[in-house]
């Protein structure tokens, strides 16, 4: 059993396992184009969104991330004006567009909010250019034509201006839907599971393309997805939701590396929770002793207590070993192409996972040594009985 005690980064922030990040605490409400304050939405006895507060900065792309039924799409619909909040209020550019207290409700068409729907919702009888121009009836004809040309160039479809939707690929249809939503120059663009109808390869390509288009257009974007990789790869910030509540908001790397709840830790990737005991300058675990200075924000009040240390598969190395030297045994193996995911049961019953290059093959039921090889600080949670 080995632990590498070198450290590449530290943070003074604590991780208590129970804290829910309110985005406004960090000062993000400054220059906010959207503010949601204490919003609740019920459907009968079901509370789809519960006391949610969030602000979105001008020009950023924020992704609402969570499992099906967590309330993220309902939140998007509340922003768009497709649902009314039962409590709380929504402000766009400082103007109240919905407030349960006094019944304020600005209809969708007056909110300066554009929506890209999951199925793109293009008009099949209109050309690409006509789809983009739809909703610009109050524009001067010459200005409208120039604006449509500009948007078609932005999305890379100038040569397809006269094509009907059924003559376009899925990715091209998505870009036309995006251009149409950008045409009225909204303050906010909402994207509802925008890549779910695309095949895997096109999905990766299009999310980078959409990110480029939003950046070049200078538009504030709010996306909804259940795909962790998608959210982490294109977002300035992610807002993780669960059971209608906001669990954590922040930079993707920070949220992944330092989740503030076990749910967030597990939802954003494979997570092993290794029991440890805090003593002096060390945390004693079944993976070996870990320097206390490598545990992210471990507060003094946790001296002489038990905690659970979060370990990701890329933090762990396993190697075949003779029975007497082994720390555990491989109980599960999943081939993922470039990598292989292993699950190891340690001698004390703790389960940890390791991710290796596909060329480093370890068979099922093989005795192995386990090394904690992380070079970053590790997050932790109080044990359930603390």
Image (spheres, rainbow, N blue to C red):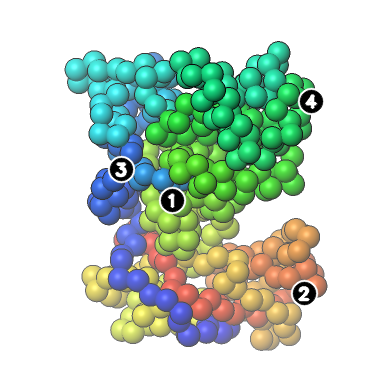
Q: Quadrant of the C terminus?
A: bottom left
For the residues carrying marks 3 and 1, which lies nearer the camera in this image?
3
Disc 2 designates what residue?
360
Position in image of residue 280 (x %, y %)? 31, 84
Q: Circle 4 — which element? A: helix
The CA span between labels 1 and 4 is 35 Å
Whether residue 74 is visible: no
Is the residue 220 above or below the residue 353 in the image? above
Q: Residue at x 55, y 65 (%)?
A: 312
Q: CA distance from mark 3 to mark 1?
A: 14 Å
Mark 3 or mark 1: name the one nearer the start of the chain. 3
What residue is pinned by disc 1?
237
Mark 2, Cα crowd under 10 Å, few <14 / some 14-19 / many 20+, is few
Numbered disc in front, either 1 or 4:
4
For mark 3, what is the residue? 32
Q: Residues within 10 Å of mark 1 (few under 14, many from 20)?
A: many
* Residue drawn 63% across the image and 38% down it: 153
Residue placed farthest to the front in the image?
142
Question: In this rendering, which labeled residue sits more in front, label 2 or label 4?
Answer: 4
Q: Quadrant of the N terminus?
A: bottom right
Q: Quadrant of residue 371?
A: bottom right
Tell me the SS state at disc 2. loop
* Labels 2 and 4 touching (C-beta < 8 A): no
* Residue that label 4 marks: 167
Q: Secondary structure at mark 3?
A: strand
First reached walking from the N terminus: tag 2 or tag 4: 4
The image shows residue 194, relative to residue 108, as above or below, that is below
Look at the numbered discs 2 and 1 and tell me whether their residues touch, using CB distance below 8 Å: no
Residue 89 lies, in percent from the top left, at 26, 28
């Amino acid at each position: 059993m080995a632990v590498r005690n070198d450290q590449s980064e530290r943070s003074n922030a604590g991780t208590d396992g129970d804290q829910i990040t309110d985005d406004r605490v960090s000062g993000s409400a400054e220059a906010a184009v959207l503010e949601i304050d204490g919003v609740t939405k019920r459907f009968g006895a079901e509370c789809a969104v519960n006391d949610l507060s969030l602000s979105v900065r001008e020009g950023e792309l924020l992704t609402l991330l969570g499992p099906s039924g967590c309330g993220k799409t309902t939140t998007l619909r509340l922003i768009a004006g497709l649902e009314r909040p039962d409590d709380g209020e929504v402000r766009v550019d400082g103007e109240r567009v919905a407030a349960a207290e006094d019944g304020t409700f600005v209809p969708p068409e007056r909110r300066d909010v554009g929506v890209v729907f999951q199925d793109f919702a293009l008009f099949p009888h209109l050309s690409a250019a006509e789809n983009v121009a739809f909703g610009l009836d109050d524009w001067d004809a010459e200005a409208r034509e120039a604006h449509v040309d500009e948007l078609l160039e932005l999305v890379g479809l100038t040569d397809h201006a006269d094509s009907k939707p059924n003559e376009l690929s899925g990715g091209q249809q998505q870009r036309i839907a995006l251009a149409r939503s950008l045409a009225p120059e909204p303050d906010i663009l909402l994207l509802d599971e925008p890549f779910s109808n695309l095949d895997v390869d096109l999905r990766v390509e299009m999310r980078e393309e959409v990110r480029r288009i939003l950046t070049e257009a200078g538009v504030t974007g709010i996306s909804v997805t259940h795909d962790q990789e998608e959210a982490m790869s294109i977002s300035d910030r992610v807002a993780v939701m669960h059971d209608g509540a906001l669990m954590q908001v922040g930079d993707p790397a920070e949220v992944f590396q330092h989740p503030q709840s076990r749910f967030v830790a597990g939802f954003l990737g494979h997570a092993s929770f290794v029991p440890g005991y805090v003593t002096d300058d060390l945390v004693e675990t079944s993976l070996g002793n870990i320097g206390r200075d490598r545990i992210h924000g471990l507060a003094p009040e946790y001296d002489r207590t038990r905690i659970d240390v979060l370990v990701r598969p890329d933090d762990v190395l396993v190697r075949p070993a003779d029975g007497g030297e082994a720390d555990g045994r491989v109980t599960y193996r999943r081939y993922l192409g470039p990598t292989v995911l292993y699950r190891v049961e340690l001698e004390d019953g703790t389960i940890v996972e390791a991710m290796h290059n596909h060329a480093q093959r370890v068979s099922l039921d093989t005795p192995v040594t386990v090394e904690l090889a992380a070079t970053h600080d590790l997050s932790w949670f109080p044990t359930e009985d603390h």
